[in-house]
Image: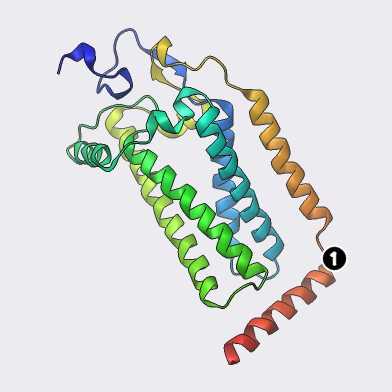
Amino acid sequence: MNAASESRAESPTLPEPARKVLVWDAPVRVFHWLMVFSFAGAYLTAESERWRLLHVSLGYTMTGLVAFRIVWGLLGTRPARFSDFVRGPAAVARYLGAMLRGRPKRHVGHNPLGALAIVALFGLTLTIAASGWAVFNDAVGEWLASAHEFAANAMLAVIVIHIAGVLLASKLGHENLIGAMITGRKLGTPEDSVRSAWRSVATLMLAAVLGFWWLQWQTAPAAGGMAGQAAASTAKHTERDDD
């Protein structure tokens, strides 16, 4: 293959001169860290009846965030669009093989393995949300509670693998990918840069999430009521187990 025909986004080396350019817009970065916070909070409160409302609220937050990210993946900046980074199984296998050999191609945006993790996390989030809603509203039997827990643990496993992949790609590519998701900047050329950070969209998204949390807090029952709900819920599940 002629070197000139190789995609800049997939080149193992950067053309000169390379400098830090804006790749990840503000909505992508705010979405990413809100998802990190929401999943961590929801997972840690999963077994606590006292923090059940917080657990549910964070689960709803994750669902809304994924819905936004799907829309932004269709209408957002070029590196954020699914058409820019979602690839087929063959591309994922090639990238994984190159990574295992210590010579992965550099991608200015998401690499194929990272893209696979993103798609898996979106699917698991929606599965967790649907099963969690059914469990919270007692819509089905206990089997769905097990499915909800399984999906949450599967998501945790994907996240651990994703973090390991990011750290390995950072080491092999001599680039701090975690830092790039904070600043939005990576090594590239002016052609790789997005024209706008879209901070207004990120601000609206953050305001919507904070507003939702405030509404949830305002509608939360008093401490005594929460204790009563917890006791009632525990009794209900105990009766089901006895049956």
- Outermost residue on the left side: it is 1
**Total numbered circles:** 1
Residue 143 seen in this snapshot: yes
Q: Residues within 10 Å of mark 1 (few under 14, many from 20)?
A: few
**In the image, is 219 to the left or to the right of 174?**
right
Identify the image quadrant of the C terminus: bottom right
Q: Nearer the viewer, residue 140 or 214?
A: 140
**In the image, is 119 to the left or to the right of 46?**
left
Residue 176 seen in this snapshot: no
2 up-or-down from 55: above or below: above
Q: Nearer the viewer, residue 224 or 9?
A: 9
Query: In terms of image quadrants, where is residue 56?
Result: bottom right
- Outermost residue on the top side: it is 17
According to the picture, the residue beneath numbered tag 1 turns out to be 222
The colour mode here is rainbow
Report x, y in % for residue 98. 20, 36
Report x, y in % for residue 228. 79, 76
Task: Identify the residue shown where x is 29% and y is 16%.
Answer: 14
Task: Identify the residue shown where x is 72% and y is 39%.
Answer: 208
Report x, y in % for residue 100. 20, 41
Q: Nearer the viewer, residue 126 or 110?
A: 126
Give the residue type at disc 1.
Answer: Ala
Task: Identify the residue shown where x is 83% and y is 64%.
Answer: 221
Q: Secondary structure at mark 1?
A: loop
Query: In terms of image quadrants, where is residue 205?
Result: top right
Identify the image quadrant of the N terminus: top left
Report x, y in % for residue 204. 70, 32
